[in-house]
Amino acid sequence: MKISYNWLKEYLPAALTISPEQISEYLTDSGLEVEGVEKIEGVKGGLEGLVIGKVLDKQKHPDADKLSLTKVDVGTGEILDIVCGAPNVAAGQKVVVATVGAKLYPTGGEPFVIKKSKIRGADSVGMICAEDEIGLGTDHNGIMILDDSAVVGQPAKEYFNIQDDYLIEIGLTPNRADAMSHFGVARDLVAVVNVREGHEYKQVQLPASMLSVSATNHAGPIAVSVENTEKCPRYCGVYISGITVKPSPEWLQNRLRTIGLRPINNVVDVTNYICHSLGQPMHAFDAEEIEGNAVIVKTLADETPFVTLDGVERKLSENDLMICNSKGGMCIAGVFGGAVSGVKDSTTSIFLESAYFNPVTVRKTAKRFGLSTDSSFRFERGVDPDSTLEALNIAANLILELAGGEITGDAVDINSNTGESGFLVEFDLKRCHTLIGEKIPAEKVSKIFDQLQIRIVRKNEDQYQLHVPAYRVDVRRECDIIEEILRIVSFNSVDIPEKVANSIAVQRKPEPEVIYNIAAGFLASNGFNETMSNSLTRSAYAEWASNSEVNPEKSVSILNPLSTELDAMRQTLLFNGLENIAFNLNRRNDDLKFFEYGKTYHKKAEKSYYEEYHLALFLTGNRYGESWRNPSEKAGFNDLKETIITLLNRLGIYKGASLEEVSNPWFEYAAELQIARKPVVTFGKISRDWQKKFDVKQEVFYADFKWDTVLQLLSFNKTGYSSLPKFPSVRRDLSLLLDQQVTFGQIETIARKQEKKLLRDINLFDVYQGKNLEKGKKSYAVSFILQDEEKTLTDQLVEGVMSKIQQALESELGASLRG
């Protein structure tokens, strides 16, 4: 949020002298973090080095018909010789003089520095200026001739009343709706100064003379009604006739320009001024466009077309609150005005609106239309419902001052909240001391409450009941009150103790962060890059899916989506990964190895949800980067499988794993790895249909780890150790002829059932299909490692084990030995 230093000072006590740097320090330390301070010059260069002078004498230049030799008094006691080319220069004139060394910034030209020089042989020490030469206008017909009352030697900056300003940019957090204005920031600043420095500056108040208006009669020509008081609890308005729409005075234009707003006209500028001064958004309607002389606050039918101020036709929702006349909508309440009803140069009468709209209503409408305006920014966070009428009166008085006219009829104030506004909060001073870690005297706490306009309703020793004003929408709990005390006192004022007491927390094993870091480190060291994607995704993805785990019924929809691309929580990491792959492929990054760790979100039943952790791996392109040492070879299913098995071995849970082929519509072919009969990871080649959906034109291999299951399995793990084997291992190979559908996993499972004690390892080291084999057959060359920790294996024992394995493979898989 942007704050003008000069504008801010309008609300500060006159006795409070404070620099922009001091303001920044106070505000940042009290929770309104200042992100930057920028000097804004009223005129480029600030007219530095320019003074008021008097032309004492003028003579014609002997060597130039269009030049004059002048003698000028600039109040220093030294008379300056200046050569001037202006046709209107004359003795006795008061003029603007740029002295030697002054840097001028002309209108529409490059800056230049005044130097002592000779012009056609005559000395010239300075320059008598025209208005365009110093950036005060565009006229270059002659020098500026000032009023006789101008004081010789007076700085031009003072004569022209040129004021520099400072733009203070605050990184406003969404909860601080009270500080969305110059008035609110000033109110906070005075409270901080009074408490920390022990001053008694008067609290910031609205100008009393502007808080009421006088009407020519009691009944106004516009009838106002509010049909939806839930969306609009308070609505105020006043009719002003006989106005003249014209440019705003310079002071108002300067205020708006400083904070980056473009002045429009005196009426619209006043509404913007009040919005940024007091935090109350306002809107002015051309009264001639109010059909039927009726203003109605209501919703319209779904899909009703409405053309907004930017000329775009938008289709309304039945939940969008509108300001209407008798024929239709004039303005989207709290968000954006209409194309027809706004103030024009020809406008002579207006209906001025000031209202309190339900923050949720405004937020939903603004997000749905993708509109973010100064009004919606404030209404979404909650403006002060108690200052609605006061702001209206101040704005009306300003319009009368700047645009003329008269108020016809009393101001309308429709307020559905008849009770006391604000919030009641219970507060315990001892608990405050415990949480802050320091005792703050009760007198000081009471002063803080007074400065923040928090009223003590009841007090019983350390127990308080407090009334918080309605504009502090972020202060509703005891912890909020404690935070208010601490930020006004200063976070930095709390001493750091010499000793810090801390309780030892017992963490569950295994620690999820530690396990994830092990896995991430392993994957990164094997060439994988980690990706981080938004948990929000398109609901359309779930509609595309035909998977038992991902479908529209399980989709967690966002009630207030930013866009259709971010309107649901993700149910899988697959879609984010395919988006990332498509993004990279479009930028000629073809060889990719990604992994992502994160949550997926699922709907179990109405208002019942659950989350799961997953680890996803993605593999596409070549196995290795382009190199003269490595031939181009595409990464495939077995590369992904190897990574999975190695990772599970690294975590120590692969023992006893089984692999089964599964059918899944996401995959062209896939397998599922189970441990202790629990599915741990599903992996395979993504189907072509899914590749097309994401415009991916090369094979993608994907693995999905159920990470919660991995952690559960790790919780049963126990670290064991054994001595190095004293006896050698024995290797035996079998060359098996098998049906094509038989997998190595089946061979491994059958072999381990036959021998659990001696069989250490099984490995597939060669696969052959093709010539000299029967159709539908393939050849596997499998090695078996056997070892006994207590004795040397005999040939008889080894052959017995291998015979048993061979027979089991023949009977269960129809395997036969190749000759």
Image (cartoon, rainbow, N blue to C red):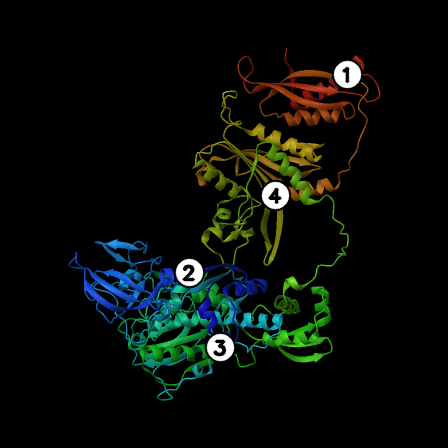
Q: Which mark is residue 560?
A: none
Decide if residue 637 is on the left or right side of residue 335. Answer: right
Q: Is the C-beta separation of discs 1 and 4 under 8 Å?
A: no
> Residue 339 appears in which quarter of the rendering?
bottom left
Q: Nearer the viewer, residue 59 or 481?
A: 59
Q: Amino acid at mark 1?
A: Val
Q: Position of residue 556 (x, y in %)?
A: 55, 54
- For numbered disc 1, what is the local secondary structure? helix
Q: Secondary structure at mark 2?
A: loop
Q: Quadrant of residue 331?
A: bottom left
Q: Residue furthest front?
A: 78
Q: Earlier in the sequence, mark 1 or mark 4?
A: 4
Q: CA distance from mark 1 to mark 2?
A: 78 Å
| Labels 2 & 4 near each other (Cβ < 8 A) | no
- Residue at point 27% right, 58% down? 124
- In this view, 288 is above or below 580: below
Disc 2 from disc 4: Cα separation:
36 Å
Tell which tag, 1 or 4, sits nearer the viewer.
Answer: 4
Mark 4: amino acid: His
- Amino acid at the residue labelled 2: Leu
Instruction: Give the label, 1 or 2, closer to the camera.
Output: 2
Disc 2 to disc 3: CB gap under 8 Å: no
* Numbered disc in front, either 3 or 1: 3
Q: Earlier in the sequence, mark 3 or mark 4?
A: 3
Question: Which kind of residue does numbered mark 3 sit on?
Answer: Ser
On residue 387, the disc is 3
Where is 592 relative to 161, above or below? above
Q: Identify residue for label 2.
A: 371
Q: CA distance from mark 2 to mark 3?
A: 25 Å
